[in-house]
Image (cartoon, grey):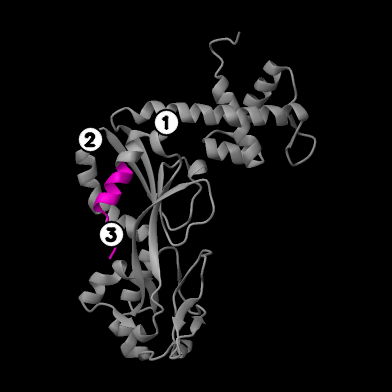
Amino acid sequence: MARPDINRSGEIEVFVRVVEAGSFSAAARALRMTPSAVSKLIARLEARLGARLISRSTRKLQLTPEGAAFFDSGVRILADMAAAEREAAAGAAPRGRLRVNSYVPFGQHRLIPLLPRFLERYPEITIDLVLTDHVIDLMEERADVAIRAGPLGESRLVARKLGQSPVVVVAAPSYLRTHGTPRTPADLDHHSRMGFCFVRHLDDWPFVDAAGEAVLVPITGNALVSDGEAMRLMALSGAGIARLARWHVEPDIAAGRLVPLLEAFNPGDEERTHAVYVGQGKHLPARVRAFLDFLVETVRLT
């Protein structure tokens, strides 16, 4: 029988994290521990089991046969524990810390203005909000919900669609006065097209020509930004031409701060926004289900 002071589930989680991360240091960062603490915990686990789980003879960690079997069992145990916790939490009133990750424009212009209403409705929930346009790993970052724009890749995550919006090419009147107004996609060769400083699923700008054929214009300019809101602000300052979701710049267009360009060549593509999360149905924690339902109820992207 195990001693009561042994945190067996904690040992299993650390061991699984080490194997999945491929190193003690990477696992330590994910678990917010020091590498030495992770190393000592694995050593204690091996001593308690009386078996070597990880071979440290090379720079790359390698599982022993006993370690491989223990890893497979550990993954199943952690999955069963997570399912049990979700099932228990599903019947409880929404409470606790809700970790949300959102791409920057949505977070600033849609989510943050709605949060006071959500927190008033669910006063026992604490929001832990991070804004970034970089796609995160929900499991690694321990986020409950991530709000993402664009196509979704293959994953084990569940997604709920929050809305969609046409994409528009825009520039500030000050930029157009200085550099002229492009009349066709080919004219963009003489203009600065702003891009992002991270890899995206599509880096070229799509258009259709007069015959309705697809045309891709590469992004070439002297401005790269970290997120959509930074691109909007750069466009407002006259730094170049931007391509953004219509909902994001609609107030600027209505106020004359930005001007839509090349609308006759717009292919009509739309940017879709989803909330993605782990788990579904009755196993979803009450706080997560409440937040997802609130987003579907309140978010408008038109």
Amino acid residing under circle 2: Pro
Mark 3: secondary structure: helix
For the magenta stretch, what is the residue range?
291-302
Q: Is residue 91 visible?
A: yes
Label 1: how many Cα within 10 Å (few below 14, some 14–19, many 20+):
some
Mark 1 or 3 closer to N-term? Answer: 1
The amino acid beneath tag 1 is: Arg
Q: Main secondary structure of the magenta part?
A: helix
In what quadrant of the picture does the C terminus appear?
A: bottom left
Point out the tag, 3 or 2, that comes first from the N-terminus: 3
Residue 90 placement, left or right of 213: left
**Mark 2 sits on what residue?**
123
The answer to whether mark 1 and mark 3 are in CB contact below 8 A is no
Specify whether 33 is left or right of 145.
right
Q: Are marks 1 and 2 in contact (CB under 8 Å)?
A: no
Q: Earlier in the sequence, mark 1 or mark 2?
A: 1
Q: Nearer the viewer, residue 93 or 34?
A: 93
Q: Secondary structure at mark 1?
A: helix
> Marks 1 and 3, Cα distance to the nearest angstrom?
31 Å
**Residue 176: x percent and y percent?**
33, 87
User: Where is 79 relative to 182, above or below?
Assistant: above
**Residue 86 - label:** 1
Q: Is residue 165 above or below residue 98?
A: below
Residue 12, picture quadrant: top right
